[in-house]
Amino acid sequence: MKQLESIQTVVRELSRRELSAAEASLIFRRSSSRFRHRFTAVVGVNFRTARMRAKLDRGAHLLIGTRLSIAEISARLGYSDRSKFEKAFKRVRGMTPTEFRRRHGDR
């Protein structure tokens, strides 16, 4: 039960900020390899995929909730350039950040 709570804490932290596997394993209080194994078993995707999805979810919230440019959002999320953010976003969301903002921005 304690391990499940630790993994839930890691997932909550991922939704708030960038978190490395080393930081996550400290929260989990186990080795990095043990953490990664349990994380995948509980969450259903590996830590790297979960971290990328959480980052892009933060980007989606910024696209809807702010007037920041896509370049500004990609920089805030740590992408080295806008095109990398756009490609990752499209791969996960099925549309570009611009399309996403147009579809969801007026709610």
Image (cartoon, rainbow, N blue to C red):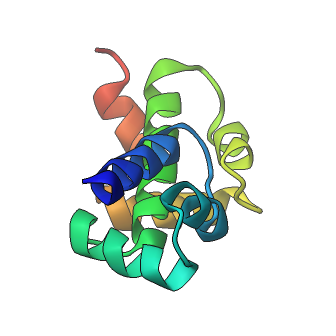
Q: Which of 40 and 75 is in front in this view?
A: 40
Q: In the rendered image of this protein, does residue 23 appear above or below residue 55?
A: below
Regarding residue 95, the answer to whether it shows in the image is: no
Name the residue: 35% across, 62% down: 92
Spot the residue most to the bottom: 33
Name the residue: 65% across, 27% down: 68
Quadrant for the N terminus in the image? bottom left
Horizontal and vertical percent for residue 7?
A: 37, 55
Horizontal and vertical percent for residue 90?
A: 40, 61
Spot the residue most to the top: 107
Q: Nearer the viewer, residue 22 or 69?
A: 22
Q: Nearer the viewer, residue 93 or 42?
A: 42
Name the residue: 56% across, 60% down: 24
Which quadrant holds residue 93?
bottom left
Q: How many labels does the image show?
A: 0
Quadrant for the C terminus in the image? top left
Q: Nearer the viewer, residue 26 or 66?
A: 26
Compared across the picture, whether 32 is left or right of 57 comes to right
Name the residue: 37% across, 68% down: 91
Regarding residue 4, the answer to whether it shows in the image is: yes
Compared across the picture, whether 66 is left or right of 54 comes to right
Compared across the picture, whether 63 is left or right of 43 comes to right
Horizontal and vertical percent for residue 89?
A: 45, 57
Horizontal and vertical percent for residue 60?
A: 44, 39
Q: In the rendered image of this protein, does residue 103 appear above or below residue 28?
A: above
Which quadrant holds residue 16?
top right
